[in-house]
Amino acid sequence: MKLLKNSKISYKLILSFILVSLFIVGVGLIGMQNMKKISNNATSMYEDSLQSLDALNTIKGNSLQLQTQFYLLVYSKDSSKLAETKDLMDRLKTQNNTLLDKFGKLNLDSNEKKLLNDYNNTLAQYRDARDKVVKLVEGGKYDEAVPALTESAKIRASMSDTLDKLIQYNVSQASDANTSNINVSNKSNVLIVVSTIVGFLFALVCGISVSTNISKRLKKVESFAHALGDGDLSKSIEITSNDEIGSLANSLNNAVQNTKYLISELSSSAQNISSSSEELSATMQELSSKMLTVNESTMDIAKGAQDLSATTEEINASSEQIGDTTYSLADKAKEALNSVKAIEIRALNIKEKASKAITEGNEIYKKQETDINNAIKESKVVNEIKELASSIGDIAEQTNLLALNAAIEAARAGETGKGFAVVADEVRKLAEESAESVKNIQEMVTKIDIAVNNLSSSGQSMLQFMTDYVQPTYELLMDTGKQYELDAEFIASISEQIASGSKSMSETIEQVTSAIETVAATAEESAAGSDEIMNSISETTFAIEEVSKAAQSQAMLAENLNKMTSRFKL
C-alpha cells in the first residue's frame, strides 16, 4: 500500500485503467468463446441434422412412392405401366444414390455410420427383390409377382425402420445442440452481467480512491498558494508522498525559502542603491556639461573634413573627365590607325589591280587589233566572190543566148530538131535561174561588204577608245593607288604618335588621380572619424543623460522596492 501511495499519479491512473481493461477483455473473451460454441452448435444443427433430415425424409418418400407404383403395376396387371414404373425406378434410384452419398459425406458419428451401413445392406436386398418383381411382370407372371412384392414390402419396411431411427437420432442431436445453445447463452448472460457489475464497482472504487487522494493534497497546495499570493512566506506544504504532487509541494517549499532569502537581500540592497543613485546622478550632470563642449569642437573638425572631402571630390571628378577624354583620344587614334592600315591595304589592292588591268588591257588591245586587221584582210574575199558572181552572170547570159539560138535552129529543123529544142529550152531555163541566183548573190555580197566595212570601222573606233580613254584611266587608277598608299603611311605615322602621346598622358593622369583619391580617402576617413567621434560623443552625451535619468529612476525604484519588500511576512 505504501508503494502505491508513493507511486506517480500517472502510474496509479494507468494501473486502474489496466485493471478495468482486463475486466473488459476478460468479459469479451468469455463472450467470444461462448458465441463460438453457439455458432458451432448452430452449424452442426444445420449441416449435420437439418441436411441429414432433409436427405433421409426425401429417401423415405422416394421409397414409398416407388413401392406404391409397384403395387399399382402388380395388382392392376396392366403391362403398359411397366415402362413408366421402370423409368420411375431408375430416376428415384439415381436420386436416392445421390442423397445417400451426400449423407455419407456429412460429419457422422459411429451410431449414424452403423445405421447407414445397415440401411445400405437392406437397400441392396430390397433392390434385388424389386428387380425380381419387374422380371415376373415382364413375363406376365402376376400371380407369382404378388408374393415377391410382399417380400419386397417387408424389406422396405425394415429400410423404413432404419431411416426412422436415423431421423429420430438426428432430431435428438438437433434438440441437444439447441439445448446446449440455450445453456451457453444463459451462462454467458449471467457471466457478462456479473463481470460488468464487478468491473463497474472496481472502476468506481479505483476512481474514488485516486480522486480523493489527489483532491486532498491539491487542497493543501491551493491553501499554500493563497497564502503565497497574500505575501505570507511563513507557511509550508506538509505532504510526504513521492508522486507528482509531493514533488510539486517540495519544489514550492524550496521556492518559498529562496524567495524569503531573496527579499531579505533585496531589502538591504535597495537601501544601498538609493544612496549610490544620488551620488551617480550628481556625477552624471557634471559629465554631461563637459561632453557638450567636446561635442561643439568635434563638429568644427568634422565640418573642415567635409569641406576638404568635397574639394578633393571635385578635383577627382575633373581628373576622371580628363582621363576619359584621353582614353577616348587613344581609342580614336587606334581606330584611325586601324582604318589607315585598311586604307593602305585597299590602296595596294587598287595598285595591283590597276597594274594587272593595264597589262591585261594592253594584251587584249594587241590581240583585238591583230584580230580586227586579219578580219579586214579576210573580208576582201567578198570582193572576189562579187567578181566571180559577175563572171557567172556573164556566162549565164551567154548560155541564155546560146539556148535561144539553139531553139531557133531546132525550129528550123522541124520534127528532127524537137528533141534538141527541148534541151535548148531546159538550158535556157537553167541559164535564167543561174542569172537570178547570181543576182541574189551579188545583193548578199553587197550587204556583207557594207557590214564588213561597218565592222572594220567599229573595230578601229574601239581600238582608238581603248588607246585614248581606257589605258589613261588605268594609269590614273594606278597613280591614285600609289598616292593612297603614301597618304596611308603618313596618317599611320601621325596616329601612332597620337596614340603614344595619349598613353603617356593617360598614365600621368592615372598617377594624379591616384594621388587625389588617396587625399580624398584620407579626407573621407577624417570626416568619417570626425562623424564617428561626434556620433560617439552624441551617443555618450545621450547615454549620460539616460544614465542620469536611470539613476533618478533607480532611486525611485529602490524606494518602491523597500515599500514592496515590507509587505512580505518573513
Image: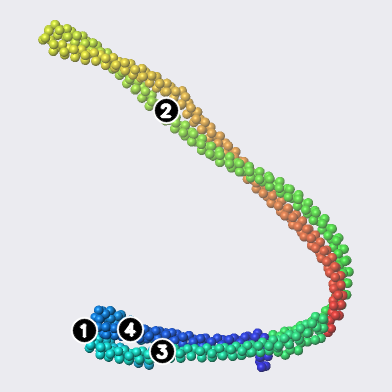
Looking at numbered disc 3 in the image, what kind of residue is underneath it? Asn
- Mark 2 against mark 3, which lies toward the viewer? 3
Looking at numbered disc 2 in the image, what kind of residue is underneath it? Asn
Looking at numbered disc 1 in the image, what kind of residue is underneath it? Gly
Element type at mark 3: helix
Looking at numbered disc 4 in the image, what kind of residue is underneath it? Gln
Asked if labels 3 and 4 touch by Cβ distance under 8 angstroms, the answer is: no
Sooner in the amino-acid sequence: mark 2 or mark 1: 1
- Residue 254: horizontal and vertical position, in percent? 76, 85
**CA gap, disc 1 to disc 3?**
43 Å
Which residue is the site of mark 1? 140
Sooner in the amino-acid sequence: mark 1 or mark 4: 4
408 left or right, relative to 366 = left
Which residue is the site of mark 4? 65
Picture layout, residue 347 above or below residue 459: below
Sooner in the amino-acid sequence: mark 4 or mark 2: 4
Q: Residue at x 34, y 22 (%)?
A: 375
Q: Residue at x 42, y 21 (%)?
A: 461
